[in-house]
Image: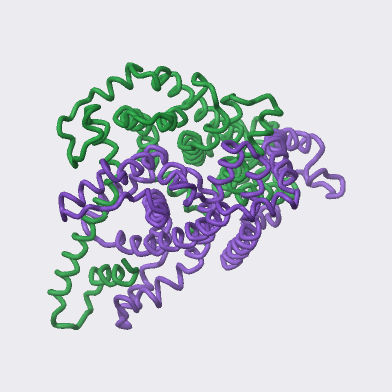
Amino acid sequence: MDGSAAQVVDVGARFDVRPRIRSALWLGLNRADAIWALAFLVPYIVTFVLFVIYPLLYGLWMGSKPSLYTDLFSDPIYQDTAINTLIYVLVGVNLRMVMALGLSGFFMRKSWWTKPLLILFILPWAVPALPTFLSIHWMLNGNWGLLNNLIWDVTGWNAPSWLDERSYALTSDIVAYIWKWLPFWTVIMLAGRMAIPRELYEAADVDGATGSRRFWHVTFPLMANLYLVCTLLGMLFTMGDFTTVYFVSGGGPANSTQVLATLGVRDAFVMSEPRLGVAAVMSAIPVLVPLVVLLMRRVRAAAVER
Amino acid sequence: MSATTLEGAAAPGGGRTSRKPNYRRRRLWGEVGAVAFAIVLVIWTVGPVYNMVMVALDRHDDVFSSHVFPPDPTLNSFWIVVSEGYWYLEYFWHQFANSFYVGIGTTFLTLFIGSLTSFVIGRMRINGGWVISNLALMTYMIPASFLAIPFYLVMQYYDMSNSLWACIAAYVVFATPYAIIVFQQYSVSIPIEIDESARIDGASPWQIYWRLYLPLMAPALVAVGTFALLLAWNDFLYQFLLLSSKRNMTVSVALAQFLNSDEAPWNYMMAAAIIYSIPPIVAYYAFRRRMTSGLTMGGVKG
Protein backbone atom coordinates (compact mmCIF):
# COMPACT_ATOMS: atom_id res chain seq x y z
CA MET A 1 0.00 0.00 0.00
CA ASP A 2 2.94 2.25 0.62
CA GLY A 3 4.17 1.68 -2.87
CA SER A 4 0.99 2.96 -4.42
CA ALA A 5 0.94 5.93 -2.07
CA ALA A 6 4.45 6.82 -3.15
CA GLN A 7 3.40 6.61 -6.79
CA VAL A 8 0.55 8.96 -6.12
CA VAL A 9 2.85 11.55 -4.60
CA ASP A 10 5.88 11.46 -6.83
CA VAL A 11 4.43 11.18 -10.33
CA GLY A 12 4.81 14.59 -11.88
CA ALA A 13 1.77 14.70 -14.15
CA ARG A 14 -1.21 16.18 -12.37
CA PHE A 15 -4.83 16.01 -13.28
CA ASP A 16 -4.81 19.63 -14.31
CA VAL A 17 -2.23 20.06 -17.05
CA ARG A 18 -2.24 23.83 -17.16
CA PRO A 19 0.81 25.22 -15.35
CA ARG A 20 -0.09 26.78 -12.01
CA ILE A 21 1.57 28.06 -8.90
CA ARG A 22 1.26 25.35 -6.26
CA SER A 23 0.32 27.63 -3.39
CA ALA A 24 -2.77 28.76 -5.30
CA LEU A 25 -4.08 25.23 -5.44
CA TRP A 26 -6.48 23.39 -3.18
CA LEU A 27 -5.40 19.84 -2.44
CA GLY A 28 -3.08 20.27 -5.40
CA LEU A 29 -6.00 21.02 -7.75
CA ASN A 30 -7.61 24.18 -9.05
CA ARG A 31 -10.70 25.38 -7.31
CA ALA A 32 -13.32 23.85 -9.59
CA ASP A 33 -11.57 20.49 -9.59
CA ALA A 34 -11.15 20.58 -5.84
CA ILE A 35 -14.90 20.96 -5.45
CA TRP A 36 -15.42 17.97 -7.74
CA ALA A 37 -12.85 15.96 -5.78
CA LEU A 38 -14.50 16.73 -2.46
CA ALA A 39 -17.92 15.87 -3.87
CA PHE A 40 -16.50 12.53 -5.07
CA LEU A 41 -15.08 11.82 -1.64
CA VAL A 42 -18.27 12.60 0.25
CA PRO A 43 -19.92 9.15 -0.17
CA TYR A 44 -16.96 7.28 1.27
CA ILE A 45 -16.23 9.73 4.06
CA VAL A 46 -19.88 9.74 5.13
CA THR A 47 -20.17 5.93 5.18
CA PHE A 48 -16.81 5.61 6.91
CA VAL A 49 -17.73 8.05 9.69
CA LEU A 50 -21.27 6.74 10.18
CA PHE A 51 -20.53 3.01 10.02
CA VAL A 52 -16.92 2.60 11.11
CA ILE A 53 -15.76 5.53 13.23
CA TYR A 54 -18.93 6.04 15.21
CA PRO A 55 -19.51 2.34 16.08
CA LEU A 56 -15.81 2.03 16.87
CA LEU A 57 -15.80 4.97 19.27
CA TYR A 58 -19.10 3.79 20.72
CA GLY A 59 -17.56 0.37 21.34
CA LEU A 60 -14.47 1.86 22.95
CA TRP A 61 -16.68 3.94 25.18
CA MET A 62 -18.80 0.92 26.15
CA GLY A 63 -15.75 -1.08 27.09
CA SER A 64 -13.96 1.71 28.93
CA LYS A 65 -15.11 0.92 32.48
CA PRO A 66 -12.27 -0.88 34.35
CA SER A 67 -14.65 -2.80 36.62
CA LEU A 68 -15.94 -4.65 33.54
CA TYR A 69 -12.59 -6.33 33.21
CA THR A 70 -12.45 -7.56 36.78
CA ASP A 71 -15.87 -9.13 36.18
CA LEU A 72 -14.66 -10.55 32.91
CA PHE A 73 -11.37 -12.02 34.09
CA SER A 74 -12.96 -13.69 37.08
CA ASP A 75 -15.42 -15.50 34.81
CA PRO A 76 -14.18 -19.10 34.34
CA ILE A 77 -15.84 -19.25 30.91
CA TYR A 78 -13.78 -16.26 29.85
CA GLN A 79 -10.55 -17.93 31.00
CA ASP A 80 -11.36 -21.00 28.92
CA THR A 81 -12.29 -18.78 26.01
CA ALA A 82 -9.00 -16.90 26.09
CA ILE A 83 -7.05 -20.18 26.00
CA ASN A 84 -9.28 -21.54 23.22
CA THR A 85 -8.79 -18.42 21.13
CA LEU A 86 -5.04 -18.66 21.51
CA ILE A 87 -4.99 -22.34 20.50
CA TYR A 88 -7.44 -21.71 17.69
CA VAL A 89 -5.38 -18.88 16.24
CA LEU A 90 -1.88 -20.31 16.74
CA VAL A 91 -2.54 -23.93 15.79
CA GLY A 92 -5.21 -23.22 13.18
CA VAL A 93 -3.27 -20.59 11.26
CA ASN A 94 0.18 -22.15 11.39
CA LEU A 95 -1.01 -25.63 10.49
CA ARG A 96 -3.02 -24.20 7.65
CA MET A 97 -0.13 -22.14 6.30
CA VAL A 98 2.28 -25.08 6.36
CA MET A 99 -0.34 -27.17 4.57
CA ALA A 100 -0.98 -24.41 2.05
CA LEU A 101 2.72 -24.03 1.32
CA GLY A 102 3.16 -27.77 0.88
CA LEU A 103 0.05 -28.14 -1.24
CA SER A 104 1.06 -25.28 -3.49
CA GLY A 105 4.23 -27.28 -4.24
CA PHE A 106 2.09 -30.30 -5.00
CA PHE A 107 -0.04 -28.27 -7.42
CA MET A 108 3.10 -27.17 -9.28
CA ARG A 109 3.44 -30.75 -10.57
CA LYS A 110 3.15 -31.08 -14.30
CA SER A 111 0.60 -33.88 -14.51
CA TRP A 112 -2.52 -33.75 -16.62
CA TRP A 113 -4.67 -34.13 -13.52
CA THR A 114 -3.30 -31.32 -11.34
CA LYS A 115 -5.42 -28.65 -13.01
CA PRO A 116 -8.77 -30.45 -12.67
CA LEU A 117 -7.76 -31.40 -9.13
CA LEU A 118 -7.09 -27.77 -8.28
CA ILE A 119 -10.48 -26.75 -9.64
CA LEU A 120 -12.15 -29.36 -7.43
CA PHE A 121 -9.94 -28.42 -4.50
CA ILE A 122 -11.27 -24.84 -4.57
CA LEU A 123 -14.78 -26.11 -3.78
CA PRO A 124 -14.68 -25.49 0.02
CA TRP A 125 -13.81 -21.88 -0.66
CA ALA A 126 -16.63 -21.52 -3.18
CA VAL A 127 -19.38 -22.97 -0.98
CA PRO A 128 -20.66 -20.47 1.62
CA ALA A 129 -19.34 -21.07 5.12
CA LEU A 130 -22.64 -21.55 6.90
CA PRO A 131 -24.01 -24.56 4.93
CA THR A 132 -20.70 -26.41 5.09
CA PHE A 133 -20.27 -25.82 8.81
CA LEU A 134 -23.80 -27.04 9.42
CA SER A 135 -22.91 -30.08 7.35
CA ILE A 136 -19.70 -30.66 9.32
CA HIS A 137 -21.62 -30.26 12.57
CA TRP A 138 -24.00 -33.01 11.47
CA MET A 139 -21.16 -35.16 10.13
CA LEU A 140 -19.57 -35.17 13.58
CA ASN A 141 -22.72 -36.25 15.36
CA GLY A 142 -21.92 -39.27 17.52
CA ASN A 143 -25.01 -41.29 16.62
CA TRP A 144 -25.91 -40.42 13.05
CA GLY A 145 -22.92 -38.59 11.70
CA LEU A 146 -21.29 -39.65 8.45
CA LEU A 147 -17.81 -39.71 9.96
CA ASN A 148 -18.61 -42.22 12.68
CA ASN A 149 -20.68 -44.34 10.29
CA LEU A 150 -17.71 -44.46 7.98
CA ILE A 151 -15.29 -45.31 10.79
CA TRP A 152 -17.64 -48.04 11.96
CA ASP A 153 -18.06 -49.52 8.48
CA VAL A 154 -14.33 -49.53 7.77
CA THR A 155 -12.73 -50.40 11.11
CA GLY A 156 -15.57 -51.51 13.36
CA TRP A 157 -14.39 -48.99 15.93
CA ASN A 158 -17.02 -47.11 17.87
CA ALA A 159 -15.70 -43.57 17.53
CA PRO A 160 -16.49 -41.00 20.23
CA SER A 161 -19.07 -38.30 19.99
CA TRP A 162 -16.76 -35.60 18.70
CA LEU A 163 -18.63 -32.55 19.85
CA ASP A 164 -19.30 -33.72 23.39
CA GLU A 165 -15.79 -33.32 24.70
CA ARG A 166 -13.78 -30.14 24.85
CA SER A 167 -10.54 -31.21 23.20
CA TYR A 168 -12.30 -33.09 20.39
CA ALA A 169 -14.74 -30.24 19.84
CA LEU A 170 -11.99 -27.62 19.66
CA THR A 171 -10.02 -29.84 17.29
CA SER A 172 -13.15 -30.16 15.15
CA ASP A 173 -13.45 -26.37 15.00
CA ILE A 174 -9.83 -26.05 13.92
CA VAL A 175 -10.09 -28.79 11.30
CA ALA A 176 -13.32 -27.31 9.91
CA TYR A 177 -11.70 -23.89 9.72
CA ILE A 178 -8.68 -25.30 7.92
CA TRP A 179 -10.95 -27.20 5.55
CA LYS A 180 -12.82 -24.03 4.63
CA TRP A 181 -9.86 -21.69 4.15
CA LEU A 182 -7.04 -23.97 2.97
CA PRO A 183 -7.93 -23.52 -0.74
CA PHE A 184 -7.77 -19.74 -0.50
CA TRP A 185 -4.29 -19.68 1.04
CA THR A 186 -3.07 -22.45 -1.24
CA VAL A 187 -4.06 -20.38 -4.25
CA ILE A 188 -2.16 -17.39 -2.82
CA MET A 189 0.93 -19.55 -2.15
CA LEU A 190 0.64 -21.08 -5.61
CA ALA A 191 0.62 -17.61 -7.16
CA GLY A 192 3.71 -16.83 -5.09
CA ARG A 193 5.50 -19.92 -6.36
CA MET A 194 4.55 -19.18 -9.94
CA ALA A 195 6.10 -15.72 -9.60
CA ILE A 196 9.52 -17.32 -8.96
CA PRO A 197 11.52 -17.22 -12.21
CA ARG A 198 12.16 -20.65 -13.75
CA GLU A 199 15.82 -19.77 -14.37
CA LEU A 200 16.48 -19.92 -10.63
CA TYR A 201 15.36 -23.55 -10.55
CA GLU A 202 17.34 -24.34 -13.67
CA ALA A 203 20.42 -22.82 -12.05
CA ALA A 204 19.77 -24.86 -8.92
CA ASP A 205 19.43 -27.98 -11.08
CA VAL A 206 22.78 -27.33 -12.68
CA ASP A 207 24.31 -26.97 -9.24
CA GLY A 208 22.79 -30.33 -8.34
CA ALA A 209 20.29 -29.05 -5.78
CA THR A 210 17.17 -31.21 -5.75
CA GLY A 211 14.35 -32.05 -3.39
CA SER A 212 14.54 -30.46 0.00
CA ARG A 213 17.68 -28.46 -0.75
CA ARG A 214 15.97 -26.89 -3.69
CA PHE A 215 13.06 -25.96 -1.43
CA TRP A 216 15.11 -24.53 1.43
CA HIS A 217 17.61 -22.64 -0.73
CA VAL A 218 15.47 -21.37 -3.58
CA THR A 219 11.74 -21.52 -2.89
CA PHE A 220 11.56 -20.69 0.78
CA PRO A 221 13.82 -17.60 0.89
CA LEU A 222 11.82 -16.08 -1.97
CA MET A 223 8.48 -16.92 -0.40
CA ALA A 224 9.38 -16.06 3.19
CA ASN A 225 7.92 -12.56 3.21
CA LEU A 226 4.71 -13.59 1.50
CA TYR A 227 4.43 -16.50 3.92
CA LEU A 228 4.90 -14.25 6.92
CA VAL A 229 2.44 -11.62 5.71
CA CYS A 230 -0.14 -14.33 5.02
CA THR A 231 0.40 -15.85 8.46
CA LEU A 232 -0.08 -12.52 10.21
CA LEU A 233 -3.09 -11.65 8.08
CA GLY A 234 -4.51 -15.10 8.72
CA MET A 235 -4.12 -14.61 12.47
CA LEU A 236 -6.00 -11.35 12.23
CA PHE A 237 -8.84 -12.99 10.27
CA THR A 238 -8.94 -16.07 12.48
CA MET A 239 -9.13 -14.07 15.67
CA GLY A 240 -12.32 -12.47 14.39
CA ASP A 241 -13.84 -15.70 13.11
CA PHE A 242 -17.34 -16.28 14.39
CA THR A 243 -19.12 -18.64 12.00
CA THR A 244 -16.91 -21.73 12.38
CA VAL A 245 -17.14 -22.06 16.13
CA TYR A 246 -20.74 -20.92 16.27
CA PHE A 247 -21.89 -23.68 13.94
CA VAL A 248 -19.40 -26.53 14.31
CA SER A 249 -19.14 -26.83 18.08
CA GLY A 250 -21.60 -24.08 19.00
CA GLY A 251 -19.18 -23.13 21.78
CA GLY A 252 -20.19 -26.35 23.53
CA PRO A 253 -20.09 -28.59 25.44
CA ALA A 254 -21.02 -26.27 28.33
CA ASN A 255 -19.32 -23.18 26.84
CA SER A 256 -15.94 -24.90 26.91
CA THR A 257 -15.03 -24.16 23.27
CA GLN A 258 -16.10 -20.53 22.95
CA VAL A 259 -13.68 -18.12 21.28
CA LEU A 260 -13.67 -14.36 21.87
CA ALA A 261 -15.92 -13.57 18.91
CA THR A 262 -18.61 -16.05 19.91
CA LEU A 263 -18.32 -15.23 23.62
CA GLY A 264 -18.75 -11.53 22.88
CA VAL A 265 -21.94 -12.17 20.93
CA ARG A 266 -23.19 -14.57 23.61
CA ASP A 267 -22.57 -12.09 26.42
CA ALA A 268 -24.13 -9.24 24.48
CA PHE A 269 -27.19 -10.93 23.03
CA VAL A 270 -27.89 -14.10 25.00
CA MET A 271 -26.88 -12.83 28.43
CA SER A 272 -28.06 -9.28 27.52
CA GLU A 273 -24.87 -7.68 28.79
CA PRO A 274 -23.59 -5.75 25.79
CA ARG A 275 -20.87 -4.00 27.79
CA LEU A 276 -19.45 -7.31 28.94
CA GLY A 277 -19.55 -8.56 25.36
CA VAL A 278 -17.63 -5.53 24.16
CA ALA A 279 -15.14 -5.98 27.02
CA ALA A 280 -14.62 -9.60 25.95
CA VAL A 281 -13.66 -8.68 22.39
CA MET A 282 -11.69 -5.65 23.55
CA SER A 283 -9.54 -7.87 25.74
CA ALA A 284 -7.97 -9.00 22.44
CA ILE A 285 -6.45 -5.56 21.87
CA PRO A 286 -3.12 -6.36 23.58
CA VAL A 287 -2.65 -9.14 21.01
CA LEU A 288 -4.33 -7.36 18.12
CA VAL A 289 -2.20 -4.20 18.18
CA PRO A 290 1.26 -5.86 18.02
CA LEU A 291 -0.07 -8.12 15.28
CA VAL A 292 -1.22 -5.14 13.24
CA VAL A 293 2.05 -3.26 13.81
CA LEU A 294 4.08 -6.29 12.74
CA LEU A 295 1.90 -6.76 9.69
CA MET A 296 2.24 -3.12 8.63
CA ARG A 297 6.01 -3.37 9.01
CA ARG A 298 6.25 -6.46 6.86
CA VAL A 299 4.02 -4.96 4.19
CA ARG A 300 6.11 -1.79 4.22
CA ALA A 301 9.33 -3.83 3.96
CA ALA A 302 7.86 -5.61 0.94
CA ALA A 303 6.96 -2.29 -0.64
CA VAL A 304 10.50 -0.96 -0.17
CA GLU A 305 12.05 -4.11 -1.68
CA ARG A 306 9.87 -3.62 -4.70
CA MET B 1 2.24 -33.74 5.42
CA SER B 2 5.39 -31.75 5.51
CA ALA B 3 6.38 -29.29 2.89
CA THR B 4 9.67 -31.06 2.32
CA THR B 5 8.23 -34.39 1.25
CA LEU B 6 5.89 -32.74 -1.19
CA GLU B 7 8.73 -30.71 -2.53
CA GLY B 8 10.72 -33.89 -2.90
CA ALA B 9 7.87 -35.51 -4.76
CA ALA B 10 7.56 -32.53 -7.04
CA ALA B 11 11.24 -32.32 -7.85
CA PRO B 12 11.82 -35.26 -10.25
CA GLY B 13 9.52 -33.70 -12.88
CA GLY B 14 12.17 -31.16 -13.77
CA GLY B 15 15.25 -33.05 -12.60
CA ARG B 16 16.39 -34.76 -15.76
CA THR B 17 20.01 -34.23 -14.85
CA SER B 18 19.85 -36.70 -11.95
CA ARG B 19 22.69 -39.18 -12.13
CA LYS B 20 21.29 -41.79 -9.79
CA PRO B 21 20.75 -45.31 -11.26
CA ASN B 22 17.46 -45.95 -9.45
CA TYR B 23 16.07 -42.77 -10.89
CA ARG B 24 13.26 -44.40 -12.88
CA ARG B 25 12.04 -46.40 -9.94
CA ARG B 26 12.05 -43.36 -7.70
CA ARG B 27 10.12 -41.42 -10.28
CA LEU B 28 7.50 -44.17 -10.47
CA TRP B 29 7.10 -44.30 -6.72
CA GLY B 30 6.86 -40.53 -6.65
CA GLU B 31 4.02 -40.71 -9.14
CA VAL B 32 2.21 -43.43 -7.17
CA GLY B 33 2.60 -41.40 -3.97
CA ALA B 34 1.26 -38.31 -5.70
CA VAL B 35 -1.82 -40.14 -6.97
CA ALA B 36 -2.48 -41.62 -3.53
CA PHE B 37 -2.12 -38.18 -2.01
CA ALA B 38 -4.48 -36.74 -4.63
CA ILE B 39 -7.12 -39.32 -3.68
CA VAL B 40 -6.86 -38.38 -0.02
CA LEU B 41 -7.15 -34.74 -1.01
CA VAL B 42 -10.31 -35.40 -3.02
CA ILE B 43 -11.92 -37.24 -0.10
CA TRP B 44 -10.97 -34.43 2.29
CA THR B 45 -12.31 -31.77 -0.07
CA VAL B 46 -15.55 -33.46 -1.03
CA GLY B 47 -16.47 -34.98 2.38
CA PRO B 48 -18.60 -32.24 3.91
CA VAL B 49 -20.16 -31.38 0.55
CA TYR B 50 -21.03 -35.03 -0.03
CA ASN B 51 -22.58 -35.14 3.44
CA MET B 52 -24.71 -32.13 2.56
CA VAL B 53 -26.01 -33.78 -0.59
CA MET B 54 -26.52 -37.13 1.13
CA VAL B 55 -28.61 -35.67 3.95
CA ALA B 56 -30.63 -33.62 1.47
CA LEU B 57 -31.45 -36.82 -0.45
CA ASP B 58 -32.49 -38.69 2.68
CA ARG B 59 -36.09 -39.42 3.44
CA HIS B 60 -37.17 -37.76 6.65
CA ASP B 61 -37.10 -41.01 8.67
CA ASP B 62 -33.65 -41.90 7.38
CA VAL B 63 -31.96 -38.75 8.67
CA PHE B 64 -31.69 -40.19 12.13
CA SER B 65 -30.18 -43.50 11.12
CA SER B 66 -26.66 -44.74 10.45
CA HIS B 67 -25.67 -44.91 6.83
CA VAL B 68 -22.96 -43.79 4.42
CA PHE B 69 -25.12 -43.82 1.27
CA PRO B 70 -28.74 -42.66 1.32
CA PRO B 71 -30.71 -45.92 1.60
CA ASP B 72 -33.66 -44.57 -0.37
CA PRO B 73 -32.65 -41.34 -2.15
CA THR B 74 -35.42 -38.89 -2.96
CA LEU B 75 -35.64 -35.33 -4.17
CA ASN B 76 -38.60 -34.71 -1.91
CA SER B 77 -36.65 -32.35 0.38
CA PHE B 78 -35.84 -30.10 -2.54
CA TRP B 79 -39.50 -30.06 -3.49
CA ILE B 80 -40.47 -29.11 0.07
CA VAL B 81 -37.98 -26.22 -0.02
CA VAL B 82 -38.96 -24.99 -3.48
CA SER B 83 -42.67 -25.11 -2.65
CA GLU B 84 -42.10 -23.60 0.83
CA GLY B 85 -43.87 -26.63 2.31
CA TYR B 86 -42.46 -26.47 5.83
CA TRP B 87 -43.11 -23.79 8.38
CA TYR B 88 -39.46 -22.78 8.79
CA LEU B 89 -39.38 -22.34 5.04
CA GLU B 90 -42.62 -20.45 4.52
CA TYR B 91 -40.82 -17.34 3.21
CA PHE B 92 -37.94 -19.15 1.51
CA TRP B 93 -38.13 -17.37 -1.85
CA HIS B 94 -38.79 -14.05 -0.20
CA GLN B 95 -35.70 -14.60 1.94
CA PHE B 96 -33.76 -15.68 -1.11
CA ALA B 97 -34.74 -12.40 -2.75
CA ASN B 98 -33.59 -10.58 0.41
CA SER B 99 -30.18 -12.24 0.13
CA PHE B 100 -29.99 -11.04 -3.47
CA TYR B 101 -31.13 -7.58 -2.48
CA VAL B 102 -28.36 -7.30 0.11
CA GLY B 103 -25.81 -8.74 -2.32
CA ILE B 104 -26.74 -6.48 -5.24
CA GLY B 105 -27.03 -3.41 -3.00
CA THR B 106 -23.60 -4.07 -1.52
CA THR B 107 -22.05 -4.68 -4.93
CA PHE B 108 -23.30 -1.49 -6.56
CA LEU B 109 -22.63 0.76 -3.61
CA THR B 110 -19.14 -0.68 -3.14
CA LEU B 111 -18.31 -0.23 -6.81
CA PHE B 112 -19.71 3.30 -6.88
CA ILE B 113 -18.13 4.56 -3.66
CA GLY B 114 -14.87 2.70 -4.19
CA SER B 115 -14.39 3.84 -7.77
CA LEU B 116 -15.20 7.48 -6.97
CA THR B 117 -12.69 7.47 -4.13
CA SER B 118 -9.98 5.73 -6.13
CA PHE B 119 -10.62 8.16 -9.02
CA VAL B 120 -9.93 11.11 -6.75
CA ILE B 121 -6.81 9.50 -5.26
CA GLY B 122 -5.37 7.84 -8.35
CA ARG B 123 -6.50 10.01 -11.27
CA MET B 124 -7.21 13.49 -9.89
CA ARG B 125 -4.25 12.90 -7.59
CA ILE B 126 -5.23 15.13 -4.73
CA ASN B 127 -2.61 15.91 -2.14
CA GLY B 128 -2.79 13.58 0.82
CA GLY B 129 -4.69 10.92 -1.07
CA TRP B 130 -2.60 8.26 0.62
CA VAL B 131 -4.05 9.33 3.97
CA ILE B 132 -7.49 8.31 2.75
CA SER B 133 -6.39 4.94 1.41
CA ASN B 134 -4.40 4.14 4.56
CA LEU B 135 -7.30 5.20 6.76
CA ALA B 136 -9.59 2.97 4.73
CA LEU B 137 -7.21 0.05 5.19
CA MET B 138 -7.33 0.56 8.95
CA THR B 139 -10.87 -0.88 8.74
CA TYR B 140 -9.31 -4.30 8.27
CA MET B 141 -7.45 -4.00 11.53
CA ILE B 142 -10.74 -4.38 13.38
CA PRO B 143 -12.17 -7.88 13.01
CA ALA B 144 -15.74 -7.51 11.70
CA SER B 145 -17.13 -9.69 14.46
CA PHE B 146 -15.57 -7.44 17.10
CA LEU B 147 -17.33 -4.40 15.69
CA ALA B 148 -20.66 -6.22 15.49
CA ILE B 149 -21.96 -5.42 18.98
CA PRO B 150 -21.52 -1.62 18.87
CA PHE B 151 -22.62 -1.68 15.22
CA TYR B 152 -25.87 -3.33 16.24
CA LEU B 153 -26.50 -0.72 18.95
CA VAL B 154 -25.64 2.16 16.63
CA MET B 155 -28.12 0.80 14.08
CA GLN B 156 -30.84 0.98 16.74
CA TYR B 157 -29.89 4.59 17.21
CA TYR B 158 -30.03 5.28 13.45
CA ASP B 159 -33.46 3.63 13.39
CA MET B 160 -32.12 1.00 10.99
CA SER B 161 -32.81 -2.07 13.11
CA ASN B 162 -34.29 -5.03 11.25
CA SER B 163 -33.42 -3.31 7.98
CA LEU B 164 -31.64 -4.86 5.03
CA TRP B 165 -29.90 -1.53 4.53
CA ALA B 166 -28.11 -1.91 7.85
CA CYS B 167 -26.53 -5.11 6.49
CA ILE B 168 -25.69 -3.41 3.22
CA ALA B 169 -24.00 -0.57 5.13
CA ALA B 170 -21.91 -3.04 7.13
CA TYR B 171 -20.74 -4.91 4.03
CA VAL B 172 -20.05 -1.75 2.07
CA VAL B 173 -17.68 -0.43 4.72
CA PHE B 174 -15.83 -3.74 4.80
CA ALA B 175 -15.66 -4.16 1.02
CA THR B 176 -14.77 -0.60 0.01
CA PRO B 177 -11.16 -0.47 1.31
CA TYR B 178 -10.35 -3.56 -0.73
CA ALA B 179 -12.07 -1.96 -3.72
CA ILE B 180 -10.03 1.23 -3.37
CA ILE B 181 -6.73 -0.68 -3.28
CA VAL B 182 -7.53 -2.92 -6.24
CA PHE B 183 -8.87 -0.02 -8.32
CA GLN B 184 -5.83 2.09 -7.59
CA GLN B 185 -3.45 -0.68 -8.57
CA TYR B 186 -5.40 -1.48 -11.69
CA SER B 187 -5.71 2.15 -12.79
CA VAL B 188 -1.90 2.50 -12.87
CA SER B 189 -2.04 0.49 -16.11
CA ILE B 190 -4.33 3.06 -17.75
CA PRO B 191 -2.27 5.97 -19.18
CA ILE B 192 -2.99 9.26 -17.47
CA GLU B 193 -2.63 10.98 -20.88
CA ILE B 194 -6.13 9.77 -21.74
CA ASP B 195 -7.52 11.86 -18.91
CA GLU B 196 -5.36 14.79 -19.82
CA SER B 197 -6.46 14.91 -23.44
CA ALA B 198 -10.09 14.68 -22.33
CA ARG B 199 -9.43 17.64 -20.03
CA ILE B 200 -8.06 19.67 -22.88
CA ASP B 201 -11.21 18.87 -24.86
CA GLY B 202 -13.16 20.41 -21.99
CA ALA B 203 -14.52 17.33 -20.20
CA SER B 204 -15.50 17.77 -16.54
CA PRO B 205 -14.14 15.37 -13.91
CA TRP B 206 -17.52 13.70 -13.74
CA GLN B 207 -17.53 13.08 -17.52
CA ILE B 208 -14.02 11.65 -17.34
CA TYR B 209 -15.06 9.41 -14.48
CA TRP B 210 -18.25 8.22 -16.10
CA ARG B 211 -17.26 8.00 -19.77
CA LEU B 212 -13.58 7.05 -19.55
CA TYR B 213 -12.58 5.77 -16.15
CA LEU B 214 -15.43 3.34 -15.48
CA PRO B 215 -15.41 1.66 -18.94
CA LEU B 216 -11.63 1.24 -18.83
CA MET B 217 -11.82 -0.20 -15.32
CA ALA B 218 -14.34 -2.90 -16.31
CA PRO B 219 -12.16 -5.95 -15.43
CA ALA B 220 -11.34 -4.58 -11.99
CA LEU B 221 -15.01 -3.71 -11.46
CA VAL B 222 -15.98 -7.31 -12.23
CA ALA B 223 -13.39 -8.71 -9.81
CA VAL B 224 -14.33 -6.38 -6.96
CA GLY B 225 -18.03 -6.72 -7.69
CA THR B 226 -17.82 -10.50 -7.36
CA PHE B 227 -15.88 -10.10 -4.14
CA ALA B 228 -18.50 -7.74 -2.67
CA LEU B 229 -21.41 -9.91 -3.79
CA LEU B 230 -19.89 -13.00 -2.20
CA LEU B 231 -18.99 -11.14 0.99
CA ALA B 232 -22.60 -10.08 1.42
CA TRP B 233 -24.07 -13.40 0.35
CA ASN B 234 -21.83 -15.55 2.53
CA ASP B 235 -21.77 -13.59 5.76
CA PHE B 236 -23.85 -14.74 8.66
CA LEU B 237 -23.12 -12.70 11.78
CA TYR B 238 -24.34 -9.27 10.69
CA GLN B 239 -27.50 -10.62 9.10
CA PHE B 240 -28.14 -12.72 12.19
CA LEU B 241 -27.81 -9.75 14.53
CA LEU B 242 -29.45 -7.08 12.41
CA LEU B 243 -32.42 -8.91 10.90
CA SER B 244 -35.09 -10.21 13.22
CA SER B 245 -38.42 -10.62 11.46
CA LYS B 246 -39.08 -13.61 9.21
CA ARG B 247 -39.98 -11.45 6.25
CA ASN B 248 -36.79 -9.41 6.51
CA MET B 249 -34.49 -12.36 7.07
CA THR B 250 -32.01 -13.59 4.53
CA VAL B 251 -31.54 -17.28 3.74
CA SER B 252 -28.49 -17.65 5.98
CA VAL B 253 -30.40 -16.45 9.05
CA ALA B 254 -33.35 -18.64 8.13
CA LEU B 255 -31.07 -21.67 7.85
CA ALA B 256 -29.68 -21.08 11.31
CA GLN B 257 -33.27 -20.91 12.63
CA PHE B 258 -33.56 -24.64 12.06
CA LEU B 259 -31.17 -25.20 14.93
CA ASN B 260 -33.72 -23.73 17.33
CA SER B 261 -35.87 -26.81 17.18
CA ASP B 262 -34.88 -30.10 18.81
CA GLU B 263 -36.03 -32.32 15.99
CA ALA B 264 -34.57 -30.22 13.21
CA PRO B 265 -35.49 -31.60 9.78
CA TRP B 266 -31.90 -31.79 8.61
CA ASN B 267 -32.85 -33.01 5.15
CA TYR B 268 -34.89 -29.86 4.46
CA MET B 269 -32.19 -27.70 5.94
CA MET B 270 -29.50 -29.25 3.77
CA ALA B 271 -31.66 -29.03 0.65
CA ALA B 272 -32.21 -25.33 1.36
CA ALA B 273 -28.48 -24.93 2.04
CA ILE B 274 -27.61 -26.47 -1.32
CA ILE B 275 -29.97 -24.14 -3.18
CA TYR B 276 -28.48 -21.22 -1.24
CA SER B 277 -24.94 -22.34 -2.17
CA ILE B 278 -25.54 -22.49 -5.91
CA PRO B 279 -25.25 -18.76 -6.77
CA PRO B 280 -21.86 -18.26 -5.06
CA ILE B 281 -20.46 -21.51 -6.51
CA VAL B 282 -21.48 -20.37 -9.99
CA ALA B 283 -19.94 -16.94 -9.35
CA TYR B 284 -16.68 -18.44 -8.08
CA TYR B 285 -16.19 -20.74 -10.99
CA ALA B 286 -17.29 -18.16 -13.55
CA PHE B 287 -14.97 -15.44 -12.22
CA ARG B 288 -12.28 -17.66 -10.69
CA ARG B 289 -9.44 -16.25 -12.72
CA ARG B 290 -10.35 -12.64 -12.16
CA MET B 291 -10.96 -13.18 -8.46
CA THR B 292 -7.59 -14.75 -7.84
CA SER B 293 -5.72 -12.22 -9.97
CA GLY B 294 -7.42 -9.44 -8.00
CA LEU B 295 -6.52 -11.09 -4.70
CA THR B 296 -2.91 -11.70 -5.54
CA MET B 297 -2.36 -8.41 -7.34
CA GLY B 298 -0.81 -6.82 -4.27
CA GLY B 299 0.41 -9.79 -2.31
CA VAL B 300 2.64 -11.63 -4.73
CA LYS B 301 4.74 -8.74 -5.88
CA GLY B 302 5.81 -8.12 -2.29
Left or right of A37, for residue B269: left
Q: Report the residue at 32% width, 28% height from top.
A: B265
Q: Is residue B178 above or below residue B80?
A: below
Chain identifier, colour green: B
Instruction: Please name the residue shown 43% across and 42% down the image.
Output: A247
Taking depth in this image into account, of B41 and B273 the one nearest to the observer is: B273
Give residue B270's quadrant in the image.
top left
Residue A32 drawn above or below residue A141: above
Q: What sort of colour scheme is used for the picture?
A: by chain
**Percent x, y for residue A45?**
71, 38
x then y, percent, for residue B193: 62, 45
Q: Residue A131's x, y, as percent?
A: 38, 37
Q: Nearer the viewer, residue A166 or A305?
A: A166
Above or below: residue A40 compared with residue A192: above
- Chain identity for the colour purple used in the image: A
Q: In the rendered image, is residue B226 in sight?
A: yes
Q: Is residue B20 left or right of residue A306?
A: left
Q: Looking at the rendering, which quadrant does residue B284 occupy? A: top left
Residue A155 to residue B210: above or below: below
Residue appearing at x 62%, y 49% in the figure: A281
**Residue located at (44% from left, 29% from top):** B257
